[in-house]
């Protein structure tokens, strides 16, 4: 454990404003003990990969005690490490090693719900209806004469209704009661109107911060507070298709009070390590699937969170005018509240962008949450080509960016996982209509041969790796200039050298509607960028035809080979005047 430095005055140029943060999904990154599931010692042993890649920090999905009904997002003890992943000492060792390597560590916190095996829910069941323990959860009488209908019409995110019959003591109450779960039935929602819940989550935050973590990613940040009275929802709104829809379980104003309190708490802490005394603090980042951009920006007002993932960018089709509109609007709304943007293209909940972009690019057409055998399959070559271009665009944009493990290898979604080995609860809960997210969670390859392609000593990892992963192992890509791994390394090195994440973006109008063109100037940029530094121009061609490059430019990096002064289809480049 590192000894925290005392809080200092807020730095002018804190690290997180342009940090690149790499998401590790602990089940699937590196397996040291050979049980087929990744673990903390495995992660610690592979951290050099992140230094070599050139990122600033690592974010880990949950590794806490959990029955693993939702791959660890069902936490049964917020202060314990699940034996599947190791021990608390392993977590301390991982944090210490990351800090030694100059990497900051962000962890997940899951405040919307607990596991049904959490001691709080067990106590609620034992003590029964009306007890103080039950009051920590959202428990309500059902509708109908005997309460046989759920209290409202809300649906679970994973499919089916969002309520299950109360399984515990009824304390003489004959009318049936139900408990709310916006996700799996094993993930009962906490009641954020209960002060005890606030106090407990404060303590959980402190537990991590005291151990030296540099930030917290807040799971389902937009769902913690529900509309008063839990009114019926308009079921014609599918939040996966229309995130702007007004729904009583998402983006309620009260959630901002929670985050103001959290910000005060986090601000009590200085940097986790004295080496970072000058450039800032621990951070809070929201997972909030909220649109429009103006609503999302409320999460990053100066007294709230530092970051909130820009999912509108992730969901945008690879179409230049659409990308420009979403980038412009989201940058403007964040700037209005003094916050940087937080870009992301892949994570453990969505189809990897190397596959998502291999579908026809019409809004709402590319699958976001799962593909299986029998579904239309992506064009893998086109998908990877566009993914490389999209990342080249993203890593030039002002603000911070998150990468998801394996995207630096160009890993595609595993779209042919047999249905009988699926683990995501979505598959069962949706009555086998939604495949769910296993395809982006397959263990990563480290070598092109050997047991589980170097993921660990077990022959068979917890999800099968598709055959094409062998060719994508870092051992095959290192030193090959045209490889995706080398592209990411170059992008990250140049981004850092040129201070791109701290520059000011200006749009350039281009003759072709298929080309997105922008300039990143040092003028008016963050003080950390040398004001005399020459501007960088970014061009992205999302169309089917090649377009001429401006005359007299020098290509700094491009997502595909550029010849004879033209920018090929589905290619992005960073250029400078020669
Ligand atoms: C978030 C997580 C997702 C999880 C859900 C419930 O969306 O990213 O993986 O299933 O919350 O905790």
Image (spheres, helix red, strand yellow):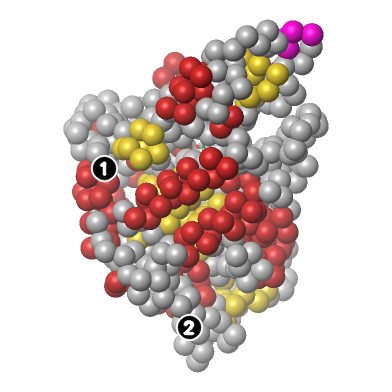
Tell me: is circle 1 under 8 Å from ligand 1.
no
Quadrant the N terminus occupies: bottom left
Q: Quadrant of residue 411?
A: top left
Which residue does the image show at 61% across and 67% down from the upper left? 302
Of the image marks 1 and 2, the number of the one nearer the N terminus:
1
> Residue placed at 63% from the left, 24% from the top?
139
Task: Name the foreground residue: 41 vs 7.
Answer: 7
Q: Nearer the viewer, residue 188 or 330?
A: 188
Few, some or many C-alpha atoms within 10 Å of disc 1 (few <14, some 14-19, many ≥20)?
A: some
Q: Residue at x 72, y 73 (%)?
A: 509
Element marked by disc 2: loop
Q: How many marks?
A: 2
The residue that appears at 63% across and 57% down in the rendered structure is 299
* Magenta extent: 145-150
Residue denoted by label 2: 529
Residue 439: give x, y in percent of width and height: 46, 32
Point out the frontmost of discs 1 and 2.
1
Q: Position of residue 63 (x, y in %)?
A: 36, 39
| Disc 1: which residue | 88
**Left or right relative to 184: residue 226:** right
* Percent position of residue 525, x then y: 56, 82
């Amino acid at each position: 454990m590192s000894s925290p430095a005392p809080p200092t005055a807020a730095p002018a140029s804190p690290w997180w404003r342009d940090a690149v943060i790499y998401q590790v999904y602990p089940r699937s990154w590196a397996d040291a003990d050979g049980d087929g599931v990744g673990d903390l010692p495995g992660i610690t042993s592979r951290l050099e990969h992140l230094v070599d890649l050139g990122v600033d920090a690592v974010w880990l999905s949950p590794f806490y005690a959990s029955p693993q009904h939702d791959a660890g997002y069902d936490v049964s003890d917020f202060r314990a490490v699940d034996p599947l992943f190791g021990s608390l000492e392993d977590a301390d060792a991982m944090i210490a090693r990351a800090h030694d390597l100059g990497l900051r560590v962000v962890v997940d916190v899951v405040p919307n719900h607990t596991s049904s095996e959490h001691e709080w829910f067990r106590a609620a069941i034992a003590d029964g209806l009306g007890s103080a323990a039950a009051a920590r959860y959202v428990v309500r009488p059902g509708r109908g004469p005997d309460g046989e209908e759920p209290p409202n019409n809300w649906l679970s995110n994973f499919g089916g209704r969002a309520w299950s019959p109360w399984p515990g003591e009824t304390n003489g109450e004959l009318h049936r009661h139900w408990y709310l779960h916006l996700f799996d039935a094993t993930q009962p929602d906490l009641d954020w109107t209960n002060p005890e819940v606030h106090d407990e989550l404060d303590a959980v935050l402190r537990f991590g911060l005291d151990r030296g973590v540099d930030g917290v990613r807040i799971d389902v940040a937009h769902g913690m507070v529900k509309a008063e009275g839990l009114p019926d929802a308009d079921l014609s709104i599918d939040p996966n298709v229309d995130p702007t829809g007004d729904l009583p379980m998402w983006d309620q104003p009260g959630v901002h009070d929670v985050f103001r309190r959290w910000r005060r708490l986090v601000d009590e802490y200085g940097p986790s390590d004295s080496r970072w005394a000058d450039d800032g603090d621990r951070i809070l980042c929201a997972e909030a699937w909220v649109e429009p951009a103006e609503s999302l920006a409320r999460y990053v007002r100066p007294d709230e969170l530092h970051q909130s993932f820009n999912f509108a960018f992730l969901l945008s089709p690879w179409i230049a005018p659409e990308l420009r509109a979403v980038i412009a609007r989201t940058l403007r709304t964040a700037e209005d509240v003094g916050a940087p943007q937080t870009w992301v293209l892949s994570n453990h909940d969505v189809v990897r962008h190397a596959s998502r972009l291999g579908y026809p690019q019409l809004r709402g057409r590319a699958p976001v949450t799962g593909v299986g055998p029998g579904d239309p399959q992506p064009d893998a070559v086109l998908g990877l080509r566009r993914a490389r271009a999209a990342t080249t665009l993203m890593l030039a944009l002002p603000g911070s960016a998150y990468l998801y493990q394996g995207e630096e290898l160009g890993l595609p979604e595993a779209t042919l996982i047999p249905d009988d080995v699926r683990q995501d609860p979505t598959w069962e809960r949706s009555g086998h209509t939604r495949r769910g997210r296993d395809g982006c969670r397959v263990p990563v390859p480290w070598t092109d041969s050997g047991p589980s392609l170097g993921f660990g000593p077990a022959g068979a990892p917890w999800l099968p790796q598709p055959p094409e992963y062998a060719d994508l192992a870092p051992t095959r890509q290192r030193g090959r200039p045209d490889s995706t791994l080398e592209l990411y390394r170059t992008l990250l090195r140049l981004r850092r050298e040129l201070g791109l994440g701290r520059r000011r973006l200006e749009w350039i109008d281009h003759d072709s509607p298929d080309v997105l063109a922008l300039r990143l100037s040092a003028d008016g940029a963050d003080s950390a960028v040398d004001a005399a530094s020459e501007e960088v121009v970014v061009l992205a061609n999302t169309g089917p035809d090649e377009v001429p490059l401006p005359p007299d430019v020098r290509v700094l990096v491009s997502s595909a080979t550029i010849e004879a002064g033209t920018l090929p289809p589905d290619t992005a480049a960073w250029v400078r005047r020669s």
